[in-house]
Amino acid sequence: MKEIDFLNIISAKLADNTYLGDDCAYLKEYGLFVTQDTLVEDVHFSLHTTTPKQLGWKTAAVNLSDLAASAALPLFLTVSLSLPENTEKKFVAEFYEGINDICKKYNTAVIGGDLTRSEKVFVSVCAIGKKTAKYDVSRKNAQPGDVIVVTGRHGDSAAGLRLLNGKKTEPVEFIEKHLLPVPQIEKGIELGHLAVRDFSMMDSSDGLADALYKIAKASNVAIEADFSKIPFNPLLQKIFPDDYKDLIFWGGEDFELVAAIPEDVYKKIDKHRFIEIGRAEEGHEVVVKGYDLTINDISFEEKSFKHFEEKQ
């Protein structure tokens, strides 16, 4: 069974599924966005490579990044933590130090949660944010002629994970991008304020290819990207010469923003903060020039991260 199959079952069984589809649910009557993500030990993180404090920061950052992709201002978090019975007090203290550090940075308050016993560490965070954009922000709003922009480099986090798994601690910038991601809150709100109509935006938590494909599919457009315009660290190619492009597109967890914005909005933005990588067009596929890559339903299924991969 694949993740999409489970999602389809859930959607079919709910009497009201109108809030589903984006990473954040928008509660229009309250002007609020709500999102939730869960991290599972030995699936999303390893305690051999991640400290409790780093885990606390990252767990909150994952959810705050979803709010950023909705141009929302973070307000509150709830944190549910499931722990083995032999967990030391120090683990909980350091975990919440990480939570507290990122909450202070983004003026966000923890307002509750849950503590339970489990065989491994499970962390589930719900984040609530306030709408700031005048217009709708959703992956389904891209239109032909829109400019595709990203907020930063891709491939760094995947490189950091690979280095950590190889028991390496340098280059530090790759390690930190993986362990301590920075949600692009300010940039998401900035695009929301500049919007002149509904527009598309996602974060690249599951990879740049994932965001491009999902925006194209939900909006019923094609996207043509130019690999030469995509920002990445030159060290990535030096360290991983054979597959650095795969890390850029399919690695995931960079938590940058990917947006499709009208040309007149693109003319107003800071080109150093928002980098053009392509255009939306009529059609149904994502094509990347300079990479010989076409992303459609078949290739996406083959390459994308699978939460429910069958055991071999």
Image: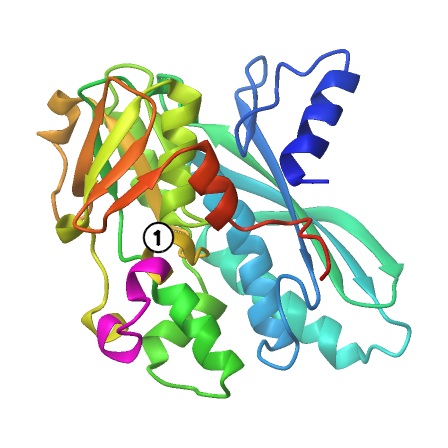
Left or right: residue 307 versus residue 288 is: right
The amino acid on which the numbered mark 1 sits, given as a three-letter code, is Phe
Q: Secondary structure at mark 1?
A: helix
Report x, y in % for residue 285.
Answer: 33, 29
Where residue 97 sits: x, y (%)? 61, 69
Of 250 and 276, which appears nearest the observer? 250
Looking at the image, which residue is at 35% across and 66% down? 156
Residue 242 visible in the displayed image? yes
Which of the 4 image quadrants contains residue 45?
Answer: bottom right
Whole-percent x, y for residue 217 in the image = 42, 25
Residue 239 included in the magenta stretch of the image? yes
Out of 239 and 76, give the one closest to the viewer.
239
Q: In this rendering, would 124 be left or right of 100?
A: right
Residue found at the far left of this picture? 267
Q: Please name the residue shown 27% across and 71% down the image.
A: 236
Q: Nearer the viewer, residue 191 or 307?
A: 307
Q: What is the magenta range?
A: 237-246
Residue at figure coordinates x 8%, y 29% from the top left: 267
Task: Answer above or below: position of 29 versus 214.
Answer: above
Direction from residue 26 to residue 37 in the image, left or right? right
| Residue underneath mark 1 | 249
Is residue 184 something that shows in the picture? no
34 in the magenta segment = no
